[in-house]
Structure formats: structure tokens, C-alpha cells
């Protein structure tokens, strides 16, 4: 079969552009409106997207003045969307820093069962002091420690998802035997961060366990992805950078003893569409004109770990910024933003304009043909296995992509025309159902 694009719809309230909520078409209350998300999910399903994705964090994001803030808890929302859709995968962000493996493994197994095998977990370690202070900590744990905890969290979760054999339920009414206790495997885990004794109280789910997704691009993040991830969301600004990241991650995955085809790399792209290039540029300028730059300065100073008042709008970034090695927060995003500003010699004002649409993800304004060309180039030139589609404005941007770009990708043989017989999210991503670790020779 010809290699096919994977498309994920990254849904963010009124759109990824920070000023999207100010447009006349936008509903500033959409971030807590279930009907809004059902509508978006059905648009993406109409385009036969592999999956949709909800970001999350255990803190209040943004200055309330900047854009719609606060969000519905993603596993709860995705459970509702599971009943309103039939095919599309449902990926939720959840933190390994501020959850426990038992409860989170149970919630994801439940979503996988309810959705018929469509659950995915975007695994994050959660940077930022704000989140830490919500959980009784004075400061965020060090970057390396967050990833060490995440690795043990994943190992425990995998044991929990495998703690029921697939045929543990006997349901023999005549004999009066519902299940076979011999096919239950308590993890009895005792490690550095977690101690988990008993088996999960949910049977093994249709996929075995959810699709494992990761989004960090730091050295620790790439090492973690090579060991565990089956899909990777990444922010890349140039084709060359994307090719380097792609080749590096595939190589690391092979070195970890895994098939490189079993990790899918999906860069983010923020498409702004117009029937002509001039129309697309005008739509992009309209959004930029609605940016409140004071909000952008505050956010940029926070990302760069600068004191308030350090940045001047019409000056470049300071020359003496700390290196990535000194940053304990979002290391890869810090480096991407600094390199973008340096490479293109942007002022702070220009940089905020560039970040307003995708927070460091690639923005692209053009006709449907130009967007399809860009996607095809990255896909065929060793930079991507698919894309994380991040519409600047929702729902109109997603609807336009499905109506005008998806048919072009299908006509070029890059994208399937429907869902076909593959039912689970793993099957859509071309991944096998994982074997139960307790039935392998090491455990038998």
C-alpha cells in the first residue's frame, strides 16, 4: 500500500491564533461549549482525520484579558465526543508530573473501552512553576527529574494495562464462573516515584493500551519518545530542521530496539487559507491586527524567563539570553523561539506576530493548492509522516481545510478517501496491538 498521510486535528477553543476570539464570527464562550467541540469533531471526521487532540495543563493558562482561558477536562470531554462520533481517534493530554499511574491508567482504559478503541494519550511532564504551586510544590521539579518520573509512570501504566489477560473474563453461566483469577497480574511495583500493588480495576481495553503520543523535542524528550512514543507532535519552522528532527528521532527509535515505522512524526502547521494568495495574506493580517501586544510581551518574557519589562517591542531580543541548558521549563520551545528570532532578525513585535498563530508552530498563509504543496513536500522529503493541523480560527479554518485541502491531498494519492475497515486508532496509524507483557517469555 502507498504510504499515506496521517492527519490530526488539534482543537483549541476559537482557534490557535490568540486573536481568533475577537473576530465577528467567533463565539468567546466556545471553550466550554460541548456542542462546539462536537461540531469540530464531526468536521474532522468528515475529512477522515486519524485523530483529534486536546491540549491541557493543571493550571489556569493565560492572562484572562488575552484570550478565552480555562478548559474542560479533556478525558471527560473526549468521553462525550466518543458518543457523538464513530471513527476518529481521541487524544487527551495528561501530565505524568501531577497524576498517579493507577487513576490515569484507569481513565484512559475506560475511554478506550467506551470509544471502541480510539483513545490516545499525549504524555507531558508539565513545565512551569504555576502548575507546581497547585500541587504543594514551591518550584517545578528539574527537567531531568520530570522525565525520570515520566519513564517510571509509563512503565507502571503499561503493567496496569496488561494486568488483565484478554481472556480473563470467562462468563460461564452454567459453571457459575465469571472470570479467571489466574489471568490477573498485579504489578506489585515499588520504584523511585511510585508504589503500585494491585491490578487495574478495568479489563484490558480494545487497543491493549491507548496510542502513546509525546510532544517534547528536547534531548530528554527525544530519548523518551524513542523509548515509548508511537506518535510525536513537534514544532518545526523549516524543512531542513524538520528533516533533521525526523531522521534523528527515527534513528533513536531504531537504537532503542523499536521499528522506526512504529513512531509517526507529525509537525504542527497553522494554515490560513484564501482563494488567492492575496486573500490568505489579508486574512493573516486581519488576525495580526487584532493582537494585543502587551499580552504577547508578558507571555514572551515568561517563556524566556526574563524579568517583566525586559523586552522592548521594536528592538530585537536581548543578546545575553541564557542557553537552553540553563532552562528548566519548555526547553525545546525556548530554543525554537530564540532561533526563529535570531535567524530572521525579528523585533519583539514581529516575533509576537509570528508566534500569535501557533506559539512556535509553522504558520502558512496561502491557497489550498499552496498548502497542499507544502504538506506534500514535507511528507515526501523525509520531514513528516503526517501533520498536526492547527486552524487559526475555529470552526471556519477546519471546515475550509476539509473542504478545500483534503480533496487535493486525496487526488494526489496522499490521503485515504475514508476510514475503511480499520477500526482502532492504532490500526489507523499502522501500529500493531501490543502483546501483553505478562505472556512474553520474560514473564511466562
Image (cartoon, rainbow, N blue to C red):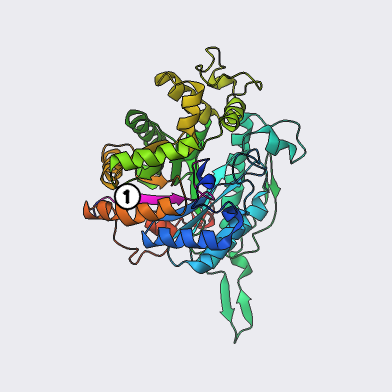
Q: In the image as oriented, which residue stretches furthest toward the left?
A: 412
Residue 233 sits above or below residue 315 on the image:
below
User: Does 379 sit left or right of 442 as displayed?
Assistant: left
Residue 114 at x, y percent in the picture: 55, 67
Q: In the image as oriented, which residue stretches furthest toward the right?
A: 136
Image quarter for residue 150?
top right
Q: Which residue is mark 1?
A: 5
Image quarter for residue 293?
top right
Residue 50 at x, y percent in the picture: 40, 56
Q: Residue at x 34, y 44 (%)?
A: 385
202 or 64, which is in the foreground?
A: 64
Magenta run includes residue 15 = yes
Assign the N terminus to one quadrant of the image: bottom left
Dominant SS of magenta comes to loop
Q: Residue at x 36, y 42 (%)?
A: 260
* Helix, strand or loop under label 1: loop
* Residue 294 seen in this snapshot: yes
Exactly how many numbered labels are in the figure? 1
Residues rendered magenta in the picture: 3-17
Residue 201 sits above or below residue 99 on the image:
below
Q: Residue at x 47, y 31 (%)?
A: 353
Residue 386 at x, y percent in the picture: 35, 46
Amino acid at each position: 500500500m502507498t504510504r499515506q498521510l496521517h492527519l490530526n486535528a488539534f482543537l483549541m477553543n476559537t482557534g490557535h491564533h490568540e486573536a481568533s476570539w475577537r473576530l465577528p464570527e467567533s463565539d468567546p464562550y466556545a471553550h466550554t461549549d460541548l456542542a462546539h467541540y462536537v461540531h469540530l469533531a464531526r468536521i474532522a471526521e468528515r475529512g477522515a482525520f486519524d485523530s483529534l487532540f486536546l491540549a491541557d495543563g493543571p493550571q489556569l493558562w493565560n492572562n484572562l484579558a488575552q484570550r478565552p482561558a480555562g478548559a474542560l477536562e479533556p478525558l471527560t470531554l473526549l468521553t462525550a465526543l466518543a458518543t457523538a462520533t464513530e471513527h476518529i481517534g481521541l487524544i487527551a493530554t495528561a501530565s505524568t508530573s501531577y497524576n498517579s499511574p493507577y487513576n490515569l491508567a484507569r481513565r484512559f482504559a475506560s475511554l478506550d473501552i467506551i470509544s471502541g478503541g480510539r483513545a490516545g494519550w499525549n504524555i507531558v511532564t508539565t513545565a512551569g512553576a504555576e502548575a507546581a504551586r497547585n500541587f504543594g510544590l514551591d518550584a517545578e521539579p528539574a527537567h531531568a527529574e520530570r522525565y525520570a518520573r515520566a519513564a517510571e509512570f509509563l512503565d507502571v501504566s503499561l503493567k496496569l494495562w496488561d494486568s488483565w489477560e484478554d481472556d480473563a473474563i470467562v462468563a460461564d453461566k452454567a459453571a457459575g464462573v465469571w472470570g479467571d483469577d489466574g489471568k490477573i497480574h498485579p504489578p506489585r511495583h515499588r520504584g523511585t516515584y511510585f508504589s503500585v500493588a494491585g491490578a487495574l480495576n478495568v479489563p484490558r481495553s480494545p487497543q491493549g493500551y491507548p496510542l502513546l503520543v509525546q510532544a517534547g523535542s528536547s534531548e530528554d524528550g527525544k530519548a523518551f519518545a524513542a523509548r515509548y512514543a508511537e506518535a510525536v507532535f513537534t514544532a518545526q519552522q523549516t524543512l531542513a530542521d524538520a528533516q533533521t528532527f525526523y531522521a534523528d528521532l527515527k534513528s533513536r527509535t531504531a537504537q532503542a530496539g523499536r521499528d522506526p515505522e512504529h513512531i509517526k512524526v507529525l509537525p504542527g502547521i497553522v494554515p490560513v487559507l484564501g482563494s488567492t494568495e492575496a486573500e490568505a495574506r489579508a486574512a493573516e493580517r486581519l488576525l495580526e491586527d487584532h493582537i494585543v501586544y502587551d499580552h504577547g510581551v508578558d507571555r514572551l518574557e515568561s517563556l524566556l524567563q526574563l524579568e517583566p519589562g525586559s523586552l522592548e517591542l521594536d528592538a530585537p531580543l536581548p543578546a545575553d539570553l541564557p542557553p537552553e541548558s540553563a532552562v528548566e521549563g519548555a526547553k525545546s520551545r525556548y530554543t525554537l523561539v530564540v532561533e526563529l528570532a535570531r535567524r530572521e532578525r525579528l523585533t519583539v513585535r514581529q516575533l509576537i506576530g509570528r508566534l500569535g498563530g501557533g506559539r512556535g508552530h509553522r504558520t502558512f498563509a496561502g491557497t489550498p493548492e499552496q498548502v497542499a504543496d507544502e504538506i506534500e513536500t514535507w511528507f515526501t522529503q523525509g520531514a513528516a509522516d503526517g501533520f498536526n493541523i492547527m486552524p487559526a480560527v475555529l470552526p471556519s479554518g477546519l471546515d475550509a481545510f476539509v473542504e478545500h485541502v483534503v480533496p487535493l491531498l486525496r487526488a494526489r494519492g496522499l490521503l485515504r478517501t475514508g476510514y475503511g475497515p480499520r477500526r482502532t486508532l492504532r490500526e489507523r496509524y499502522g501500529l500493531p496491538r501490543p502483546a501483553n507483557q505478562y505472556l512474553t517469555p520474560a514473564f511466562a
